[in-house]
């Protein structure tokens, strides 16, 4: 009677094809995680850019001597500050399918 060197139980023995398939699944999941991280980071940076631009417009309104222009700049800054991130989030959710 020949003794096998593989002392694992039959439940722990995996074929080489199964191991290769599992490793491929891990690689695919890692790539999906990296893609998701890139997309989410890009969306967060876009939202921050909208906030900064809106604050810039509102700040410009406070530092101008033309009252009519100051009013327009302030209102534009409020709209950009509020709607820019909201529309970025809506677009993100629509593109990603949530």
Image: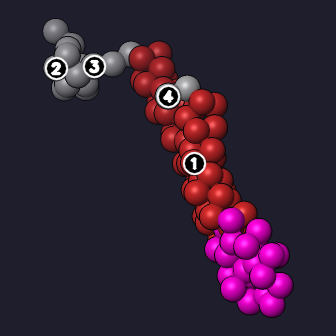
Viewer-side label of 1, 4: 1
- The answer to whether 65 is drawn above or below residue 94 in the figure is below
Q: Along the horizontal axis of the image, is 92 left or right of 2? A: right
Q: Is residue 55 magenta?
A: yes
- The answer to whether 12 is drawn above or below residue 72 in the figure is above
Viewer-side label of 3, 4: 4
Q: Are marks 3 and 2 in contact (CB under 8 Å)?
A: yes
Q: Along the horizontal axis of the image, is 68 left or right of 16? A: right
User: The residue tagged with tag 2: helix, strand or loop?
Assistant: loop
Viewer-side label of 3, 1: 1
Residue at 19 percent of width and 26 percent of height = 7
Residue 35 x/y as whole percent? 60, 41
Q: Is residue 59 magenta?
A: yes
Front-most of 38 and 55?
A: 55
User: The residue tagged with tag 4: helix, strand or loop?
Assistant: loop
Front-most of 65 and 98?
A: 65
Residue 86: mark in rendering: 1
**Of helix, strand and loop, which mostly describes the magenta segment?**
helix
| Residue range corresponding to the magenta coloring | 54-75
User: The residue tagged with tag 3: helix, strand or loop?
Assistant: loop
Residue at 16 percent of width and 9 percent of height = 1
Q: CA distance from mark 3 to mark 4?
A: 40 Å
* Mark 1 or 4, nearer chain start: 1
- The answer to whether 73 is drawn above or below residue 62 in the figure is above
- The answer to whether 51 is drawn above or below residue 59 in the figure is above
Identify residue for label 2: 9
Residue 30 x/y as whole percent? 51, 39
Neighbor class of circle 1 (other Cα within 10 Å; few <14, some 14-19, many 20+) is some
Identify residue for label 4: 98
Identify residue for label 3: 13
């Amino acid at each position: 009677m020949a003794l096998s060197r593989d002392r694992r139980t039959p439940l722990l023995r995996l074929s080489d094809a199964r191991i290769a398939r599992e490793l491929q699944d891990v690689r695919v999941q890692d790539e999906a995680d990296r893609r998701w991280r890139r997309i989410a980071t890009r969306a967060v940076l876009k939202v921050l850019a909208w906030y900064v631009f809106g604050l810039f417009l509102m700040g410009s309104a406070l530092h101008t001597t033309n009252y009519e222009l100051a009013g327009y700049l302030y209102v534009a800054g409020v709209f950009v500050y509020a709607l820019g991130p909201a529309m970025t989030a809506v677009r993100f959710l629509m593109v990603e399918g949530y």
